[in-house]
Amino acid sequence: MARPITLFTGQWADLPFEEVARLAGEWGYDGLEIACWGDHLDVSRWDDAEYVQGRKDILERNGLKVWTISNHLVGQVVCDDPIDQRHRDIVSDRVWGDGDAEGVRQRAAEDIKMTARMAAALEVKTVTGFTGSSIWKYVAMFPPVSAEAVEDGYRDFADRWHPILDVFEEVGVRFALEVHPSEIAYDYWTTKRTLEAIGYRKSFGINWDPSHMVWQDLDPVGFLWDFQEHIFHVHCKDTKKRIGNGRNGRLSSHLAWADPRRGWDFISTGHGDVPWEDAFRMLNAIGYDGPLSVEWEDAGMDRLVGAPEALEFVRRLSTYEPSTEAFDAAFSSQN
């Protein structure tokens, strides 16, 4: 099934937006999933028609379109606890303000509302991102954590995101949470619990990224089937596990990316353990016709090599159509 293949600009935000668009266009990408940081997209200018048209003009000059924008960094802050220097490093002065934790969370929520309005201004229907989580800090469950404390975390998520989703629905845009460690939904069962907590709102769904499932030993293909009606967007990113030597651990020992002592690494699409062919067949089966967004993350490969190579890999596997003929039909044909 032919789907647009886009490049996620989050890992390219050190370059000017015009330069990333030029590269992606020359490589043959269909469009960009535009990150709302660096100089790529300033959501506070959602009502500046000249600015919005300028972004569209850059895309058009390079033969690109946009189906999705991302605000992962600010979304992370909406529910996180504690708020600390890590968050100061990833958000704007506008969101950080005086650094008061609750004020930062509330300003982040307002920024995500502006992201929905920017998406609508760009005529984009989907925003990808993170939600943050006040209970990720309890994942090891020691000291012991009560069921009530965990339930409070899901309630906090719902209380903070319902007003945000009101704005998304007002402007006709959806939010796709990337299921990811450190988020309110990070595996199969937490995804189910998150959807329940938000009341299965139609404006809240999933950005499917198999790389975060593989290193947890989840089945990313089965996940697509079980959550098919909630799959709003797809990231093409890969993971390579190196756990079998008895020394490398799944939690990766605070080691830097590409350190051979890590238990796993993000790796350029097609070079890892994601079962891509099965995944694309499943995307066909569930009728997903949205973008396939290449998210380049590989500390062992230059991105100028990895991004065009990933495009070629994804295009080769994703463009074939399901058969219109039943291969066993001829077995019962009559002369």
Image (cartoon, rainbow, N blue to C red):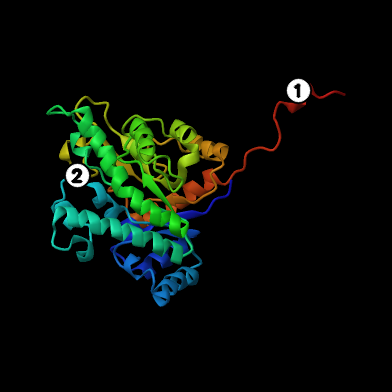
Coordinates of residue 201 in the picture (x, y in percent): 43, 44
Coordinates of residue 235 in the picture (x, y in percent): 41, 47
Q: Residue at x 21, y 24 (%)?
A: 246
Give the amino acid type for the residue marked by disc 2 in the picture.
Answer: Ala
Depth order, front residue of 229/106? 106
Res 257 seen here: yes
Q: Residues within 10 Å of mark 2 (few under 14, many from 20)?
A: few
Disc number for residue 108: none
Q: Residue at x 22, y 54 (%)?
A: 105
Give the amino acid type for the residue marked by disc 1 in the picture.
Answer: Phe
Is 111 positioned to the left or the right of 67 in the image?
left
Q: Which residue is mark 1?
A: 331
Q: Which residue is mark 2?
A: 256
Q: Residue at x 39, y 53 (%)?
A: 166
Q: Earlier in the sequence, mark 1 or mark 2?
A: 2
Label 2, secondary structure: give it: loop
When asked about the image quadrant of residue 155, the answer is top left
Depth order, front residue of 158/271? 158
